[in-house]
Image (spheres, rainbow, N blue to C red):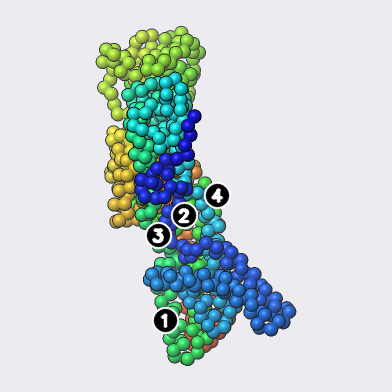
Amino acid sequence: MEIVGTTLENQVRHQSGVPAGPSSPGEPAFETPLKKPGESTIAGIAVAGIALHLLLRFVFSFPPIVYFLPLWVVLVVGGAPLIFTLAKKALARKFGSDLLAGISILTAVLVREYLVGVIVVLMLSGGETLERFATRRASSVLDALAKRVPSTGHRKAGNSLVDISLADITIGDLLVVLPHEICPVDGVVVEGRGRMDEAYLTGEPYEISKTPGSGVLSGAINGETAVVIRAEKLPVNSRYARIMQVMKETEQRRPRLRRLGDLLGAWYTPVAVALAVAAWALSGASERFLAVVVIATPCPLLLAIPVAIIGAISVSARRGIVIKNPAALEQIDRCRTLIFDKTGTLTYGEPSVSEIVCVDPFQRAEVLRLAASLEMYSKHPLAGAVIRAAREGELPFEAVSQISERPGEGLRGIVGGRQVLLTSRKQLGEAGRELPAQAPGLECVAMVDDKLAAVFRFRDVPRADSRMFLSHLRPRHAVRKLILVSGDRESEVRYLAEEVGIRDVHAGKSPEEKVEIVRAETRHEKTLFMGDGINDAPAMQAATVGVAFGHASDIAAEAADAVILEPSLSKVDELIHISARMRSIALQSAVGGMALSMIGMIAAAFGYLPPIGGAIAQEVIDLAAVLNAVRVAIPSKSLTDF
């Protein structure tokens, strides 16, 4: 067999001008205070340097040139890279909460207060280390997308199969998709019958039957029978590749979230620097400048806010919510436009019997009992819905014999001595004219003893709490706009919208169209997008916050800022409450800590607080702020209000 190692990922990258090879995560979803890696290393070096300095100075009584040596090492190894990074940010006019700390380090070195400088290095690197440790991501979205695509296809050559790379597939090739494989290209079925799961690609909640002439999508999961397809597009132009391209573009254009610490630091830093300069100018003592900037170092922002975030991450994890992006956690309760996918989020994501229209003289319970007994022996996507309906009605199951399920003919069998056939409307021919008019959704026809008995209608019904959850968002969480966006059919999406009370509806949308809708809304308000499929991943990246719901695809989970493991809308409400509580407590710690620092700054400006005293006072303030921030990790009795 011919096997070539070119993957769809590399084809996509080649088409978009990106070098082939392992995918990169793209631009970061939010700006961290420190761009370069190694904050944990710097924090460790700072702790070791301070400990060694104290030992050499107070235990072994070495001369200054010796006991200052560990501090110099820390300032060179840890402080210099931090100063360099902060200088670049200052030149780019990005004045965040960490700039003041950088000024403190530099001033401490100039006036030979090395211990003060190292303490600030520790505080600056420590907060980022804690947050990164709590939120380390396993892999990038593009990596997860690429891993899901097969690297080869099975080309039919006479009576044999030849494995070829996706790069070698051409339009018109006959390819065999084996059971449970992922379809490599968009095409048309030419041989065989089966079913494919396209839910993650299209939003269609059911497995789709495939017969000769049916279209297939790349990325769809084949069922239990092999089918032969004719390639209609090249792999690089197929549906799954387009989603990868949209994902890459969206990831690079993802809206940056301004962190809470930076928002507060934007005004606090100029005020502190101005006060420090004024104290130096009026007194002529450079030590006062250092004392002011040291006590002003925004450690409540650098430490208390990360601690509050870690507490929120911990509470979320205990409640089955995985926080992947802490910056988004600061924004969730600020989102005023909520955008929902349909399948698997506001619905259960599986067909349910919505109606049984019986033909006289047959009764609902009788037909349901016979049909469910026969469906026990079928693997059809609708079989489970019929069986569940019978069990919910506490109906007994009958003995079944002579079962037959030929492709295209339906399911036959003898149930309790009666001949039962479950088939489609079109298989009945002329007899189908007696049936009720076809309604939106899926259906099957039941015949008993060669007589029309009933029409079973199926729909992906709303979750029991969908309407209640949506109706409480406006009064309780100040949500201004609710939008339903789906790749499913117009009739199905409209049906759901009416059931749950959403007026703004977009049906039949591709991943690209979903992204444009989300971007348009995000230009006006902060947005939260919730979905569970591969086709939702680009829209999650485009929203202010993306939430993957329930048994989401691995692609959607990677793209999301938060993943709700349990398919329950009450968990979404809990996430909003956790975000609001975290933000409230973080603001208490940050603003309270800065208020105390302002008092210390005034004392330092008038000469009542030396630099080392300012550093110690700042540590006391930090401790108070951090202890308050720890309250976030203490679970509340209830985090839902609907």
Marks 2 & 4, CB-CB < 8 Å contact = no
Q: Nearer the viewer, residue 434 or 355?
A: 434
What's the residue type where badge 3 is placed?
Leu
Mark 3, secondary structure of its residue:
loop
Q: Nearer the viewer, residue 367 or 121?
A: 121
Looking at the image, can residue 367 be seen? no
Q: Which mark is residue 420?
A: none
Residue at label 4? Answer: 318
Mark 2, secondary structure of its residue:
loop
Please determine whether, in this image, residue 316 is positioned above or below residue 286: above
What's the residue type where badge 1 is placed?
Ala
Q: How many marks?
A: 4
Q: Alpha carbon of mark 1 to alpha carbon of mark 3: how far?
A: 28 Å
What's the residue type where badge 2 is placed?
Asn
- Looking at the image, tell me whether mark 2 or mark 3 is earlier in sequence order: 3
**Quadrant of the rendered image containing residue 88:** bottom left
Residue found farthest to the front: 2
Residue at label 1? Answer: 274
Residue at label 3? Answer: 257
Q: Alpha carbon of mark 1 to alpha carbon of mark 2: how far?
A: 34 Å
Q: Which mark is residue 325?
A: 2
Which residue corresponds to the image point at 42% horizontal and 56% vertical from the top-left?
A: 27
